[in-house]
Amino acid sequence: MGNPGFRYKRTRHNIGFLVIDHLKKTNEYSAPVKRRNYTFSKTVLGERNVILAKPLTYMNGSGEAVVELAQQFKIPNRNLLVILDDFNLSFGKLRARSKGSDGGHNGLASVIHELGSSNFSRLRVGIGKGNLVDTVEFVLSKFNRKEKKELPGLIDLAADACLHFVAEGISQTMNQFN
């Protein structure tokens, strides 16, 4: 998940988009195709069809894009993996889950609401709290100098977790990356 547009491109809230972009660079995916609420690219990894998608809605409306994608491609919830930022996790930490609450994340709340279920996999990518004064201001801000140095490694790790999810499923991904 993330926010569309140049203004948000390298912000903490867009870590999901950064992971998607990295996956596209390191694997061969089709050219992006635009739909009403999202863009997507496809590939085959092993014997599995994989679709990488980015909502064109803002974060708080991400559920509309996820539902539209799932319906178009007939993707069951068990095959969805939502990638999102989490300021309750230290910068650089990952937490994969097969289901759960939104944890106060409005984008995830939107997905849960629109799907009518919290039974789908998610990969939370820790962005830390920093000197959290205003949550919105923090998540929409750019990474600091130290974080920028560590960001490539974090994005690599999160991309590896996504590929592990495709190959092994959420339980093994949780065991390996949590």
Image: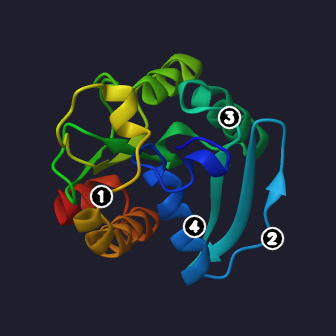
Mark 1 highlights which residue? 144
Question: Mark 4 = which residue?
Answer: 21
The residue carrying pointer 1 sits among few (fewer than 14), some (14 to 19) or many (20 or more) residues within 10 Å by Cα, namely few
Which image quadrant is residue 102 in?
top left
Left or right: 44 as drawn, with respect to 170? right
Dot 1 falls on a residue whose secondary structure is loop
Label 3 vs label 4: CA separation?
A: 18 Å
Q: Residue at x 47, y 63 (%)?
A: 19
Please name whichever residue, 144 or 25, is drawn nearer the observer in this view of the structure: 144
Mark toward the viewer: 4 or 2? 4
Name the mark nearer the viewer: 2 or 1.
1
Q: Spatial distance from mark 3 to mark 2, Cα to Cα?
A: 19 Å
Give left or right: position of 134 versus 27.
left
Is disc 3 placed on a helix, strand or loop?
helix
The secondary structure type at the circle numbered 4 is helix
- What residue is shown at x 30% (from left), y 28% (from top)? 100
List the residue tagged with mark 2: 31
Dot in front, 3 or 1: 1
Circle 2 crowding by C-alpha within 10 Å: few under 14, some 14–19, many from 20 = few
In the rendered image, which quarter contains the C terminus? bottom left
Indicate which disc, 1 or 4, sits on the residue closer to the N terminus. 4
Question: What residue is shown with label 3?
Answer: 65
Residue 51 coordinates in the image, percent (x, y):
65, 59
Q: Earlier in the sequence, mark 3 or mark 4?
A: 4
User: Which amino acid, mark 1?
Assistant: Asn
Kind of residue at disc 3: Ala
Q: Earlier in the sequence, mark 4 or mark 2?
A: 4
Image marks 3 and 4: residues in contact by CB distance under 8 Å: no
Residue nearer the viewer, 149 or 41: 149
Label 4 to label 2: alpha-carbon separation: 12 Å
- SS at badge 2: loop
